[in-house]
Image (cartoon, rainbow, N blue to C red):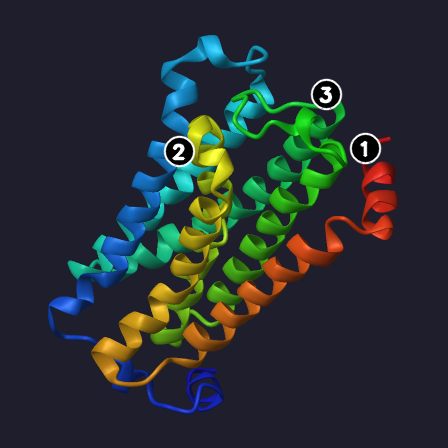
Amino acid sequence: MGVTQASAFGRSPVQWTDRTAGRWFFTAAATASLLISIASFAPAIVHPEHRPGTLNWLSVVHGLLYFLWLVIFVVQTLLVQVRKVSIHRTLGTASMFLAIAMVATGYIAVVAMTRRGFDFSGDLALSTDPLGPINQMIFPLSEAFEFGLLVFAGYIWRRNLAAHKRLMLFATIALLPGSFAHFVGYYYPLHAHPWFLNTPVLLSLTVPALYDLIRFRRIHPVSLWVGAGLFSANAAINNYIGASGLWHRIAEWMIR
């Protein structure tokens, strides 16, 4: 498997090994993802008076699972740095069950949110969407799908270290648009400036490729094609799929 994976990416994994200070890139990226999530959801937690409703157990479990993933992702990068590879592998396998639970509770939570017509944080303003809450439903569902797909790919390609860590990073990046949306939604003055949401999403997708260019003078295939794929998928969802009649009929069937 190791030989097949290496050849599939066209270059020996050894040539993608960073032994400089840049080896901390993935730890820094994981930590940044965790901090972004905290900054985005903390206001609604610290100021519950702004919530349109009381949190239920499903929302709490859903949030805790996603937060736990971000913490484990930071821990995983640190375990690699201190060469605790056996612990990293064991925790990684266990994390696959966490990822399954995240996708499952994510789907259930999104359906429940769409049925009631608002999110508990009050940040997303579902009720003010001209096309209704169903129009917003596709965004968290697509993020959960992208996350699950990338985590699965990262686990399958775990013997190719360069591909594995980039796939896991992109899986976590796939979750960030939701955090950015909550951040922009909470701070009302930002509503008039859509680029406050679109710009960080785009930048997050290009960060792995920028790291590759700076450190290796070339872009790893995962950084290139997964980044481009996520960007294209998000653009299609935003501009075409989300507002389509076909998606609305599917969404209406899902929330029946």
Marks 2 and 3, how far apart at CA: 22 Å
Check disc 2 and give the amino acid type.
Answer: Ser
Task: Look at 26% across and 85% down and name the residue there.
Answer: 217
Drawn side of residue 89 relative to residue 255, left or right: left
> Which mark, residue 255?
1
Residue 162: tell me if it is visible.
Answer: yes
Mark 3 surroundings within 10 Å by alpha-carbon count, few (fewer than 14), some (14 through 19), many (20 or more): few
Mark 1 surroundings within 10 Å by alpha-carbon count, few (fewer than 14), some (14 through 19), many (20 or more): some
Drawn side of residue 94 relative to residue 138, left or right: left
Q: Nearer the viewer, residue 125 or 115?
A: 125
Check disc 3 and give the amino acid type.
Answer: Arg
Q: Could you say which quadrant of the image residue 39 lies in?
A: top left
Drawn side of residue 94 relative to residue 256, left or right: left
Q: Which residue is mark 2?
A: 40
Q: Nearer the viewer, residue 150 or 191?
A: 191
Q: Nearer the viewer, residue 67 or 131?
A: 131
Q: Could you tell me residue 255's position as x and y percent? A: 81, 32
Q: Which residue is mark 3?
A: 116
Up-down: is 152 above or below 106?
Answer: below
The secondary element bearing badge 1 is classed as loop
Marks 2 and 1, how far apart at CA: 27 Å
Residue 87: tell me if it is visible.
Answer: no
Q: Could you tell me residue 57's position as x and y percent? A: 57, 18
Up-down: is 127 above or below 183?
Answer: above
